Image (cartoon, coloured by chain):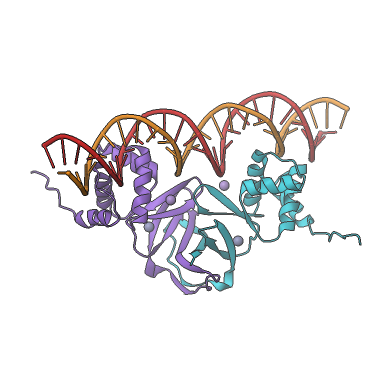
Chain colours: A cyan, B purple, C red, D orange
Amino acid sequence: MASIQKSRPYAPVLDRLKQAGLRPTRQRIALAKLLCDAGDCHFTAEQLHAKAAAAGVRVSLATIYNTLHQFTHAGLLREIVVSPGSSYFDTNISDHHHFFFEGRGELSDIAGDDVVIASLPQPPSGTTVDRVDVVIRVKNI
Amino acid sequence: MASIQKSRPYAPVLDRLKQAGLRPTRQRIALAKLLCDAGDCHFTAEQLHAKAAAAGVRVSLATIYNTLHQFTHAGLLREIVVSPGSSYFDTNISDHHHFFFEGRGELSDIAGDDVVIASLPQPPSGTTVDRVDVVIRVKNI
DNA sequence: AAATTTGTTTAGAGAAGTTCTAAACTGTTG
DNA sequence: CAACAGTTTAGAACTTCTCTAAACAAATTT
Ligand SMILES: [Mn+2]
Ligand SMILES: [Mn+2]
Ligand SMILES: [Zn+2]
Ligand SMILES: [Zn+2]
């Protein structure tokens, strides 16, 4: 039985690139598709580099970094900093929070609704809130 | 008029070192006093190194790192990760949260009371909550 | 108070993650 | 199909942090 690849809606992603003034290069398209197909997940630059290599996509690590930052600025990804030494990127750009497993160095999503913040202080004058990050650091019992 | 140095309660800090099985070396005592005198603040290893140098305390950077981690494990400091590339340490070990100024790369405290979390999800089975970090990322208008 | 032991500091090397550089390349525009 | 502007790349460079092993200092024993 031939396996039928479900077609994914890549068009919106490519539109997003165009909007951001980014040319649809072979590398960006391949990475956008990889990320699109991956579903909600958290990964480092090195991990994406490895994943691209595994998928037969030849991209330099410098391009991985460039692309991750460009996609982040274009609103296609979110950067999360939870442990010193490396950044994580998140394909889930909806409003949500994270568990961080200190032992394994892994993130998992918490739906936005599952964290109810009843009150927050005003941001200092002259500033506006960019984002509120809640990280629940957990460790094995 | 001679300036009179107010005596600080360094004793509890030195006791804490002893409890943690850490010898009261010249370097640890000097750093503990610097931190104690600084009041609530957030700083990187390099910043503490510079501050020690400015105060005439000669300590290697390796010792700064060792000491920061030892003090953190002894509960005298808290490590905060908000930006890729470097860790911040916090002399305020009470329960509290942070504003992070993205432009300047600086942290400021939010009293624990000023963030009211009405509900949090259960930690995944097999894990316990170590800490809940709330970071309000702000940027200049 | 010397000798011994154990823990600590240090300079410098090394590791890891990320950014920079400048040359080759590719997408776009006229 | 030029010409141009943006992109990719290998490799060097940079930053932060850790490791190594030798010198050193505090604690303990004699
Ligand atoms: Mn970034
Ligand atoms: Mn640490
Ligand atoms: Zn997420
Ligand atoms: Zn703080």
The x, y position of residue A83, in whole percent, is: 50, 53
Query: Does D23 sit above or below residue B138?
Result: above
The residue sitting at 38% across, 39% down in the picture is B62
Query: Does B48 sit above or below residue B39?
Result: above
The answer to whether residue A78 is seen in the rendering is no
Number of marks present in the image shown = 0
The x, y position of residue B42, in whole percent, is: 37, 51
Indicate left or right for A109 with B78 as reference: right
The answer to which of B53 and D19 lies nearer the viewer is: D19
The x, y position of residue B138, in whole percent, is: 48, 56
The answer to whether residue B113 is seen in the rendering is yes
Which residue is at the far bottom?
A: B118
The answer to which of A79 and B78 lies nearer the viewer is: B78
The quarter of the picture showing ligand 4:
bottom left
The residue sitting at 45% across, 68% down in the picture is A120
The image quadrant of residue B18 is bottom left
